[in-house]
Image (tube, rainbow, N blue to C red):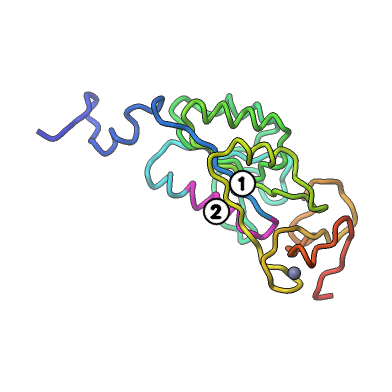
């Protein structure tokens, strides 16, 4: 006799969804400078979960409206559906009991209470994948990122290519006048730089002119 769950689902389905409460949760942080491929990596992981038919939700802070309100969009324009939320706490009410994977893009824009939200979800058995800038334009730790990286089981630090020397870039150089810590000016206002080429607190013209 083939193994079948009482509700008639196949064993494959059974393996994935039988006991979501017993699933160990975890926190994954994908970080790096601008143009390091953080969102692409988040989308790649979310796609794999989707192929596995795991119930999932992707969120993004409402503050980031550079592109459109409902998609996580990379600079290459490759998108995934995302729910915009104004505050970190709003996420808890939007994650149903069946959800086993939660993605959060641009996580650096949330307040520090995002750390507690992410912890609560992981303690509930959810795999939480957070993507965000680890440093602001001054090269300083960005908002809740240090705390998130500390509580995470897995931290992936991605690098961009330095716009000046072609080396491994870890920092985001601001190219326009000060608009605060938020990177809402859009990709054109920044370029990736390595430690050597990065100029903290300065507004530098692009290398191309
Ligand atoms: Zn460089």
Q: Secondary structure at mark 1?
A: strand
Q: Marks 1 and 2: CB-CB under 8 Å? A: yes
Task: Answer whether residue 41 is magenta in the image.
Answer: yes
Answer with the quarter of the image where residue 93 lies. top right
Q: Position of residue 54 (x, y in %)?
A: 41, 38
Say whether residue 15 is left or right of residue 153.
left
State yes or no: residue 94 in magenta. Answer: no
Whole-percent x, y for residue 157 in the image: 61, 53
Give the residue at the far left of this rendering.
1
**Is the CB–ligand 1 distance for label 2 below 8 Å?**
no
**Residue 68 coordinates in the image, percent (x, y):** 66, 48
Looking at the image, tell me whether mark 1 or mark 2 is earlier in sequence order: 2
**What residue sits 64% from the left and 38% below the top?**
148
Q: Is residue 53 above or below residue 189?
A: above
Q: Which residue is mark 2?
A: 41
Residue that appears at 76% across and 72% down: 164
Q: Which residues are magenta?
A: 33-46
According to the image, label 1 marks what residue? Answer: 131
- Mark 2: few/some/many CA within 10 Å (<14, 14-19, 20+): some
Residue at x 71%, y 38% (from the top left corner): 144
27 is higher (above) or lower (below) than 139:
above
Q: Quadrant of the C terminus?
A: bottom right
Q: Where is ligand 1, by quadrant?
A: bottom right
| Mark 1 and mark 2: Cα distance apart in space | 8 Å
Image side of residue 10 versus residue 143, left or right: left
- The N terminus: image quadrant: top left
């Amino acid at each position: 006799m083939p193994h079948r769950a009482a509700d008639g689902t196949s064993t494959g389905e059974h393996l994935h969804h039988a006991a979501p409460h017993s699933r160990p949760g975890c926190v994954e942080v994908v970080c790096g400078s601008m143009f390091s491929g953080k969102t692409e990596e988040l989308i790649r992981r979310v796609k794999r979960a989707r192929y596995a038919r795991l119930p999932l939700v992707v969120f993004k802070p409402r503050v980031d409206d550079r592109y459109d309100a409902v998609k996580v969009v990379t600079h290459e324009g490759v998108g995934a559906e995302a729910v915009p939320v104004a505050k970190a706490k709003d996420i808890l009410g939007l994650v149903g009991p069946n959800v086993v994977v939660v993605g959060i893009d641009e996580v650096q824009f949330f307040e520090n209470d995002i750390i507690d939200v992410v912890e609560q979800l992981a303690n509930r058995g959810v795999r939480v994948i957070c993507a965000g800038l680890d440093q602001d334009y001054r090269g300083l730790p960005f908002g809740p990122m240090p705390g998130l990286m500390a509580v995470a089981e897995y931290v992936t630090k991605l690098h961009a290519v330095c716009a000046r020397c072609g080396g491994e870039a870890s920092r985001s150089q601001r190219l326009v006048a000060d608009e605060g810590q938020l990177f809402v000016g859009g990709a054109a206002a920044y370029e990736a730089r390595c430690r050597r080429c990065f100029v903290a607190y300065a507004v530098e013209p692009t290398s191309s002119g």
